[in-house]
Amino acid sequence: MNVVQSIADVRRIRRESGGSWGLVPTMGFLHAGHVSLVERARRENDFVGVSIFVNPTQFGPTEDLAAYPRDLARDLQLLREAGADLVWTPPVEEVYPAGFQTYVTVEEVTKPLEGAARPTHFRGVATVVAKLFNVFQPDRAYFGQKDAQQAVVIRQMARDLNFPLEVVICPIVREADGLALSSRNVYLTPEQRTAAPVLNRALRAARTAWEAGERDGEHLRQIMRAVLDAEPLARPDYVSAADPVTLQELGDAGRGVLLSMAVRVGRARLIDNVLLVNG
């Protein structure tokens, strides 16, 4: 497994290898969800590249950039075991050199949900992912469904900018009690960790109602809010029943719906979702 820091080294290895490449972008502090992306990329490509980069442009001024968890040695061991061929661990100045001033902005689908709560977030995400696509030039890029809006944004960007690759969205990996895996779960105290699966319970309650025939978007949102309200440690930022493509809130969820939420539990801001489609 090659571990490199420079763009030139990534491009050289990519150029010399031949074959198909899968890319798994990460911010490190890897867990079983990241490993599942690498393993799928391993199955579907000749080579697998992984980026480990805590991207400063997607953090707001009051967010946890400095405190974001990091453990590069452990990450590299997990990636060796999962079969990665190339890991890029660039310093910030390699990605954003002095004088950097070009950003990628995806318009409408970045405005609701996470975009409303974190106005500069998706500009940073779209910019760094565009740079990753340009540096690695992968045939396929792998992302988790847990970041549902991010998946929509990246697919939109890849279409709009004609990136010659396939964006592959992989299922959420969960703990036994339903909590979606996240690097930020490390922030939870034992009491908060016990409370955190309330997100999954709220989503499951709304999913059960939808599967039983409930199609009113506001009623689905009320069902989720009621479950969250019963947990004193849960402080919702938003609860959504939105169109899976446009991310606009739905009145009629008959053709399908993305149920999602962001909830603060202690210092951790947790997100989760479930995608429901007919057929």
Image (cartoon, helix red, strand yellow):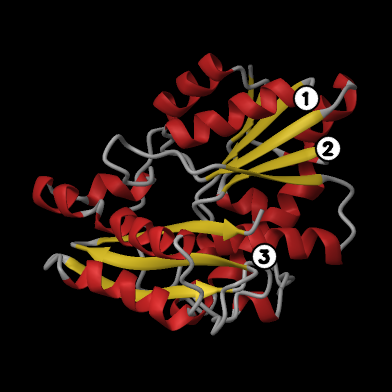
Task: Give coordinates of residue 58: x percent, y percent.
Answer: 53, 64
> What residue lies at 77% left-to-right and 25% top-to-bottom?
45
Instruction: Tell me the kind of residue under disc 2.
Output: Asp
Which badge, 1 or 3, is on the more N-terminal residue?
Answer: 1
Classify 10 Å Cα crowding around label 3: few (below 14), some (14-19), many (20 and above).
Answer: many
Instruction: Tell me the kind of residue under disc 3.
Output: Val
Classify 10 Å Cα crowding around label 1: few (below 14), some (14-19), many (20 and above).
Answer: some
Which badge, 1 or 2, is on the more N-terminal residue?
Answer: 1
Task: Give coordinates of residue 42: x percent, y percent.
Answer: 68, 22
Which badge, 2 or 3, is on the more N-terminal residue?
Answer: 2
Name the residue tied to disc 1: 45
Q: CA distance from mark 2 to mark 3?
A: 19 Å
Residue 159 falls left or right of residue 220: right
Task: Give coordinates of residue 135: x percent, y percent.
Answer: 78, 44
Circle 1/circle 2 CB separation < 8 Å: yes
Instruction: Tell me the kind of residue under disc 1.
Output: Asn
Classify mark 1: helix, strand or loop.
loop
Name the residue tied to disc 3: 153
Name the residue tied to disc 2: 139
29 relative to 95, above or below = above
Question: Which residue occupies the extreme front position in the image?
Answer: 212
Q: CA distance from mark 1 to mark 3?
A: 24 Å
Q: Quadrant of residue 22?
A: top right
Q: Is residue 97 visible?
A: no
